[in-house]
Amino acid sequence: MHGAVTASMDPKPRRRRIFVGTLLLALSGACNTVEYYEMQAYSDPVMEFDDGATETHWFQKVHYSVEGSAGGIGTGAGGGCGCY
Amino acid sequence: MLLRSWLATWVVLVAAASPLAAQQLDGSGKVMPDPELTDPSSGLTRSIATRLGYFDQKDSIDGNPFLDESLTVIEPVVILDWDLSKDLGYTLKAAYDNVSSASIDRLHNYPDQSGASGDYWYGLEFGMRHRLDDEWRVGWHLGASVEYDYRSLKAGGETTWTPTDGRDARVTTSLDMFLDDLDVIRFNGVDEGSDQRFSVASTTQWYQILSPRMHALLGATLAYQNGFLETAYNGVVVEDGATPPFPFDNGALGTEITEELPDSRTRLALFGRLRRQLVEGTALELGARFYGDDWGISSVTLEPRLYQILLHDRLMMRLRYRYYTQSAADDYVESLPNAPLPEFRTSDSELGEYDAHSVGLKFLWFRKGEWEFDIGGDYMLREDGLDTMLASIGWKTYL
């Protein structure tokens, strides 16, 4: 009983449960088919996921130049330029 | 002079990526019209996109107080994207960087300096994509880039699986390799010959439509590098009380020695984006990235974005905030005391600890399926004082 009370006061398992629950909730969406006639929102330009190839290239180059965790140009490898 | 040189380069790059490259020549040398080019119902993607980017990092006595880390980059890039048929397409990318940096200026202090450290960069990449069937696509690409003291070859490929059973998903896996060859020209102009760097990275991304108004992307990148991983011209200050030949930015007395870093590095990044349409013409996105490597750097990036239509079918705005925090590499030091020197050391601010907050605004004018024009800018406030301004303008025409 004492152990159960201690466990419920520990915030870590609760956080883990919330994280797993959120992940399962998100993944459950993948099992549901969105019908074709329900997808008109995806023709709205604000839902376009792709930033465009030239902008993607530009931000990869810039972040690679100033951030220690950035990848490289067109990849996460870190190659492609000496980069300043 | 500088303006004229990069404008001329941009014109050359645009010409090099001309759509004529996709047309066929008959025996007489005349350009034959491609019947699919004139068929607007073919559903093929054919576009040319250009961008001119400007990057400016100011350093008074910020970042590493011993070093001047000012940097300005101007980059034009052109990308031609061309479907030859519904099963085959190619991409051609050409880019040029013009770089002014403190590391270049500093070399002029030394009589034997060579001017190395890259005050220009040229890059060219060619890729093909093939549709195998309704579900599978494969692609490959080859690239090369060159700087004064740096040459790089790139090769890679990817597969994309789009299940057709109504799962509303797409899974992409890619593999990229770089083989870089560089001249080891140190901060004082001493040329230590050439060395190599090998990099390989694999990325898997899962795109998923979650609901009629929400979609997401999850991904992971695992990368490995070995070889010469230092920045050849980077130095580390040793405060020994002696007068240096050239004073450091903060007036400290000492000497400068070469940066030394391990010859391998393994990196892992997990990233995701979730976007939801709130009402027609308005969407909100939350992006995040978590990163760790065996040099001791870990980082977290959070990036919420707001997309808003300002004029129906004409003008869109993107407002973004980007929070970035990273821990320092194990071998990072601001300076070293005059004592036994560690085997590995770096004072590169890129490998130091800092937080950064960026705010960016972009406006996109467009006519669906015909053209797009955008202009935008970001300002990055860094905790270590190396604030950065970014701006770019882009143009894309569907052909």
Image (tube, coloured by chain):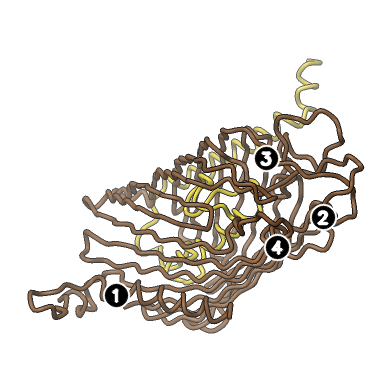
Chain colours: A yellow, B brown
Q: Amino acid at mark 1?
A: Pro
Q: Is residue B294 left or right of residue B134?
A: right
Q: Earlier in the sequence, mark 1 or mark 2?
A: 1
Q: Is residue B344 left or right of residue B311?
A: right
**Judging from the image, what secondary structure is the residue with disc 3 in?**
strand
Chain containing mark 2: B
> Tag 3: Cα neighbours inside 10 Å, few (<14), some, or many (≥20)?
many
Query: Which residue is under mark 2?
Result: B246
Chain containing mark 4: B
Where the C terminus of chain B falls, by quadrant? Answer: bottom left
Where the N terminus of chain B falls, by quadrant? Answer: bottom right
Query: Which residue is under mark 4?
Result: B105
Q: Amino acid at mark 4?
A: Asp
Q: Position of residue B356 (x, y in %)?
A: 74, 56
Chain containing mark 1: B
Q: Are marks 3 and 2 in one subunit?
A: yes
Q: Residue at x 70, y 62 (%)?
A: B105
Q: Earlier in the sequence, mark 3 or mark 1?
A: 1
Q: Earlier in the sequence, mark 3 or mark 2?
A: 2
